[in-house]
Amino acid sequence: MTPSLSHRLKMALRGIGVRQLRLICGLILFSYLLSHFLNHALGNVSLQALADGVAYHLAFWQFLPVAVLFYAAALTHGGLGIWALYQRRQFSRNTLEPLQLVLGLSIPALIFSHLAGVRLGYTLYGHEKLYPQVLYSYWAGPSWRLWLMTATLLMSWTHGCIGLHFWLRLKPFYRRAAPWLLACAVLIPTLALLGFYRGGRDVMTASAAQQWRAENLSPRQMGTPPEQAKLEAIMNGFLIGYFGLIGIVLAARGARALHERRGGMVTLSYNNGRIIRVPKGLSVLEASQRNNVPHASMCGGRARCSTCRIRVIGDASTLPAPSPREAFVLAQVGAADPSIRLACQLRPTDDLSFFQLFMPNLAPGDRGSQRAGIGQERYLVSLFVDMRGSTGLAEKRLPFDVVFIVNRFLGAVSQAVLSNGGQPNQFVGDGMLALFGLAVDPHMACRQAIQAARDIAANIAELNAVLSHDLHDPIRFGIGIHGGEVIVGEIGYRDHMVFTALGDAVNVASRLQDMTKTLGCQVIISDDVYARAGVASGTLPQQEVEIRGRAEPMRVRTAMDPADLGSLAPATEEGAAA
């Protein structure tokens, strides 16, 4: 167990790259922004509610470990945003990524005046500015400051929401949750701005009283003119430095582009005959986007999916080595072949010919479109079932009779799959692939697949009884079940598109089904599916088998008689309830 745990930890660390670090920091900052917005919304209640809310807000975010984490995340996220401005050579025209980057780079310049007045004032001079002082400074000062703060709040929220959208859109639950998340994305800032407005009006009303002004607008709280002048000088210095840094990055981009053009061009040859020439340094995906070549990429080039995969033609040993993140993604989808690379990560230094493994869908009437909606990555359980002895069956019967029997077999299998929440997906001769987990979580999908295997056996037993007068031997079958991350989507050409799943997990399920012949059993279930289903560990015998294409043996569970699976249902339900 210890080696397995260390291996998983190592794989998890390999999967953390610059984009994952930026995502983690962004989630921390968005949590702070959400807390701040909810606090603003209390202004719709009263000034006292604002004061009570900010006490809890400050107690959490100024707690030393949390404060260190927050400021580290702010510096890291901002620095990685500037690095992204330099590094990214091409943006897809059909995504929100350019808008997200522009908003993100604008936020520091807009928010620093607020930080200088509140946080730096407290750190340097002990100013105690809370909601009464902050609201008064905005509502009693020049109107442009109020509009600037409103724009800053909306831009920060929009930037964060776009980032959440890019992160969550590959998640299975996102399509169902999207309407609710959109409602929250609109409602929360609306309530926050209304609370900000209501609080400001209440503060201006209260400020008419001399006693209130004496209690809330003293030099200890607002600062003296020299202190305010010093804070303004710091703010101006920051803005000059920040805009200077952006200018340096843009100049560095220009210098790099000039250097790359002088450094030479490379030729990229696509499987459809398209040939383009691009400067060295562009990734294959960036080259496709720059030259309007349709190229699938569900995650927008963030190395969070594998839909931009290509297979290099020729010698792959001269290619740049995969980054840790690219190696992690390729390992996740079982792409051990060195000729298979991620187009968003591979930056060729020599001419390159390749196949796109996943072609974007182009509608018949819109072939010039760059629409690349081919599917998503998610955990599914694959169940392969195959009818035994169909060849011998065909030798002794008329073709129509054989088709009739095979259709009855596939009908019995499909009925069991559908009744347990699965989806019959592919029919190949006398075999079928069924998918579980399209609408449920992985644990439920594993339970459904095992229960479907049990019901398939029962349905085939009934079919054998019905056809006993016509069959010399009963229909026999083999079932293989395995789960894992796969790509689901429509595969095919033009009007001949079919929905299916692609990935190592599907291939393994097929090989487990083939292995039932050599092991003399009727059902083989991978140990991962068995454990996720919540079945007691000793219910079915365990063994290790060699899987073609895998370096290490796999632990599986075997059932000689599918009727044995009937005893799994009570344990499964208990596991689910637990």
Image: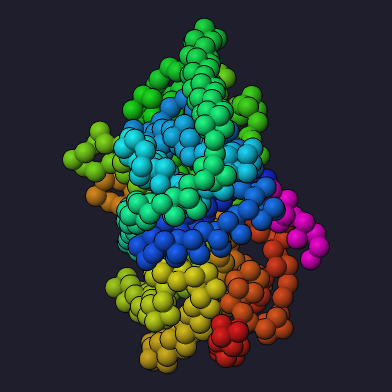
In this rendering, position of residue 226 left or right of residue 376: right
Q: Position of residue 273 (x, y in %)?
A: 37, 26
Residue 82 in picture, x, y percent from top left:
53, 29
Image quadrant occupied by the N terminus: bottom right
Q: Is residue 77 visible?
A: no
Q: Quadrant of residue 397?
A: bottom left
Taking the view exactly as shown, the residue that stands out farthest to the right is: 2
Q: Does the magenta portion include 10?
A: yes
Q: Residue furthest left?
A: 365
Residue 317 lies in quadrant: top right
Q: Say left or right for 390 vs 554.
A: left
**What secondary structure predominates along the stretch shown in magenta?**
helix
Task: In the rendered view, tell whether residue 211 sits above or below residue 450.
Answer: above
Quadrant into which the C terminus falls = bottom right
Name the spot of residue 281 as percent of width and height, x first: 53, 21
* Front one among 100 and 204: 204
| Drawn side of residue 274 relative to residue 87, left or right | left
Q: In the current view of this chain or complex, which residue is farthest to the top?
A: 262
Kindly tell me whether residue 536 is visible in this rendering: yes
Q: Nearer the viewer, residue 140 or 398?
A: 140
Magenta range is: 1-13
Residue 503: x and y in percent read 52, 54
Residue located 34% across and 75% down the image: 407
Task: Judge whether 86 appears above or below 126 on screen.
Answer: above
Tally of numbered tags:
0
**Residue pictured at 41% horizontal, 61% vertical:** 47
Q: Nearer the viewer, residue 502 or 87?
A: 87
Of the pair 320 and 65, the residue shown nearer to us: 65
**Residue 552 lies within the magenta run:** no
Q: Residue at x 44, y 65 (%)?
A: 49
